[in-house]
Amino acid sequence: MTMKYGIVIFPSKKVQDLANSYRKRYDPHYALIPPHVTLKTFEASAGQIREASDTLSSIAKNHKDFDMSIKKVSSFQPVNNVIYLKIEPTDGLNQLHQEINEKIIGEKPEYAFVPHITIGQKLSNDEHSDVYGSLRMSDVGHEETVDRFHLLYQLENGSWSVYETFRLGKD
């Protein structure tokens, strides 16, 4: 039997609070998972996940802490009506994403990696237009250091729970 897994970065409480102030109104997944940056999602069996966990542990040792900078609100429209906090791409984040996607089982990502934290999704066109119109001029201006990432698994009710946490550059 396979389960659904995700590899994510959880931002600081300050960013989570900011994201949740919008998510509780505009994101139907609000109650299922805290605000996060998705690095990969995949399905795996119990045996595969043990192997993936060992691989993630060695990936984490290869990477150092890196800075994450959020400057503005953006949107994936016209591809889909998702509004998000845009994360400035950095070498540290891109290299971590790339290595995880090369070494962990699962399909290659459907889209190019755009690091972001979703704050609204599944919005109607009018709703998207109104919300994005009012948020896109917001100056978010936040910097923080990322020193870990997490392997999550999805429960039957659709919510996500932490399976394991990996600290960057640590054993």
Image (cartoon, grey):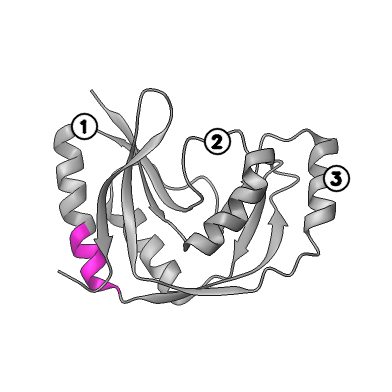
Tell me the tag on residue 29: 2
Tell me the tag on residue 132: none
Apparent side of residue 83 relative to residue 41 in the rendered image (left or right)? right
Circles 1 and 2: CB atoms closer than 8 Å: no
Establish if 16 lies above or below 48: below
Quadrant in the picture for the N terminus? top left
Q: Which residue is mark 1?
A: 45
Q: Is residue 58 magenta?
A: yes
Tell me the tag on residue 130: 3
Circles 2 and 3: CB atoms closer than 8 Å: no
Q: Position of residue 36 (x, y in %)?
A: 48, 52
* SS of the residue under disc 2: loop
* Residue at 36% from the left image edge and 23% from the top image edge: 156
Q: Position of residue 74 (x, y in %)?
A: 71, 58
- Magenta span covers which residues? 57-63
* SS of the residue under disc 3: helix
- Give the tally of numbered discs: 3
Name the mark nearer the viewer: 1 or 2. Answer: 2
| Quarter of the view holding residue 26 | top right
> Whole-Å distance between the Cαs marked 3 and 1?
42 Å
Kind of residue indicated by mark 3: Asp
Badge 2 or badge 3: first in the primary sequence: 2
* Residue at 28% from the left image edge and 69% from the top image edge: 168
Badge 3 or badge 1: first in the primary sequence: 1
